[in-house]
């Protein structure tokens, strides 16, 4: 579990590379800063009160109490099969990467001060409550029987939906629709995708909280879904745009990883193959739809994480098999349509809550510090105007 925690931690620097390669040269350090600053900011928030809100003793199934403030009462005592401190540290890595995912929607135009304030508030008011609902033993979705093995709803659906709201609320980048926004370093993005794939085994297999058959199942389903989605996205792109691209391949890869996340420990390898194929095509379609609707989700955080998380959460209700994991339940294909209904309810409830709180936070942060840089700062680039640095000297 310590190794799995380290793998999940590696995903956030991997995300920085994945996102950083897709922006323009003048914004790469600012894009890196979104991910790296979350590593520190969310760590401190988690220790102070975040873990307690997410996993403390429930208050009505909606929020944890103050049992674990400053990690009080969190030590070497068992939490399931592992020390409580290890469980806390593993969950911390999920809390870190979730707000960093949102940044893909507003890169190249958000003030850094606004990002810091928004991330702190969003983690506290969206991530922590939803994690409690879904994963804490007293959470209302947990008690309802909603399944989310490693964060399809808690991580990707919340982050992806918030990303869409951020993109629409903040508006398009200067020149969007008239200029071509070309990745400044595609090999950097590909390297980031490789690190995400590698780290995702800790994300999903580690969510079994043990080294055993369930971890093996999650490991295999994760890999199969990623490969299947990469192929289906690339095939769709090849058909519609007449040539396969490496950016399309790695985007499909990540879409498959996102979609299998809630299902990894509940479905068979065959089920994961189907989830991967479906997610690659559907998420590719969501990215194409962005071009039709003319909103600027800069790095497709909604198209990949939001749509992929939504799809994965629902497909758990189709492909889940109780025989594979007694903590799970049979899905639609095993004769139990009720699970699909529960999954849909969870998606709707989490989506509504996330959308409202995110919009309120954007309005609040905009009023307090201003969300968007000036036009002059945007033209100069955020590396120099927000951080006084340059990634490249020539």
Image (cartoon, grey):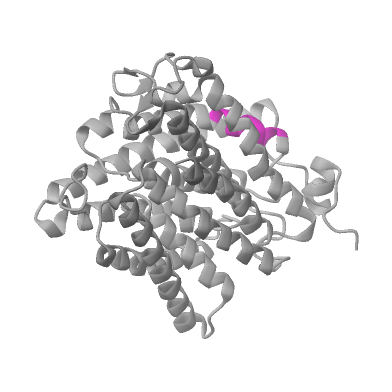
Q: Residue at x 35, y 43 (%)?
A: 210
Q: From what the image shows, is residue 375 above or below residue 276?
A: above
The verdict on residue 116 being magenta is yes
Residue farthest left in this picture: 335
Q: From what the image shows, is residue 6 above or below residue 249?
A: above
Q: For residue 67, what is the image quadrant?
A: top left
Q: Residue at x 66, y 60 (%)?
A: 176
Q: Locate residue 185, reporting x and y percent.
A: 71, 66
Q: From what the image shows, is residue 145 above or below residue 212?
A: above
* Quarter that holds the N terminus: top left
Residue 98 vs residue 356, the one in the foreground = 98
Q: From what the image shows, is residue 54 above or below residue 289?
A: above
Q: Is residue 33 left or right of residue 165?
A: right
- The residue stretch that appears in magenta: 113-121
Q: Locate residue 184, reporting x and y percent.
A: 73, 65
**Residue 37 shows in this picture:** yes
Residue farthest bottom in this picture: 242
Q: Locate residue 287, reporting x and y percent.
A: 49, 64
**Residue 181 shows in this picture:** no
* Quarter that holds the C terminus: bottom right
């Amino acid at each position: 579990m310590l190794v799995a925690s380290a793998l999940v931690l590696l995903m956030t620097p991997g995300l920085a590379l994945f996102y950083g390669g897709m922006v323009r040269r003048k914004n790469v350090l600012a894009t890196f800063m979104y991910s790296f600053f979350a590593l520190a900011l969310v760590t401190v928030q988690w220790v102070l009160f975040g873990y307690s809100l997410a996993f403390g003793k429930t208050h009505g199934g909606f929020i944890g109490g103050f049992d674990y403030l400053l990690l009080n009462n969190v030590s070497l005592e068992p939490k399931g099969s592992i020390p409580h401190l290890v469980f806390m540290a593993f969950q911390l890595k999920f809390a870190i990467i979730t707000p960093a995912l949102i940044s893909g929607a507003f890169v190249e135009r958000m003030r850094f001060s606004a990002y810091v304030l928004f991330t702190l508030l969003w983690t506290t008011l969206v991530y922590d409550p939803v994690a409690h609902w879904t994963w804490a033993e007293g959470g209302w979705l947990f008690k309802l029987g909603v399944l989310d093995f490693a964060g399809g709803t808690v991580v990707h659906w919340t982050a992806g939906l918030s990303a869409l709201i951020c993109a629409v609320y903040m508006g398009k980048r200067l020149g969007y629709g008239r200029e071509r926004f070309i990745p400044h370093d595609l090999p950097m993005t590909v390297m980031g995708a490789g690190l995400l794939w590698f780290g995702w085994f800790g994300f999903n297999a580690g969510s079994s909280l043990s080294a055993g058959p369930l971890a093996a199942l999650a490991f295999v389903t994760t890999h199969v879904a990623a490969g299947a989605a990469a192929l289906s996205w690339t095939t769709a792109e090849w058909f519609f745009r007449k040539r396969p691209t490496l950016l399309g391949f790695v985007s499909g890869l990540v879409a498959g990883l996102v979609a299998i996340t809630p299902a990894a420990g509940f479905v068979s390898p065959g089920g994961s193959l189907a989830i991967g194929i479906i997610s690659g095509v559907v998420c590719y379609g969501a990215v194409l739809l962005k071009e039709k609707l003319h909103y600027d989700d800069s790095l497709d955080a909604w198209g990949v994480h939001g749509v992929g998380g939504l799809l994965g959460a629902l497909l758990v209700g189709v492909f889940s098999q109780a025989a594979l994991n007694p903590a799970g339940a049979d899905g639609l294909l095993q004769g139990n349509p009720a699970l699909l209904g529960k999954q849909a309810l969870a998606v709707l409830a989490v989506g509504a809550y996330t959308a409202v709180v995110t919009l309120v936070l954007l309005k609040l942060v905009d009023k307090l510090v201003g969300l968007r840089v000036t036009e002059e700062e945007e033209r100069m680039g955020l590396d120099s105007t927000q951080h006084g640095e340059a990634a490249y000297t020539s």
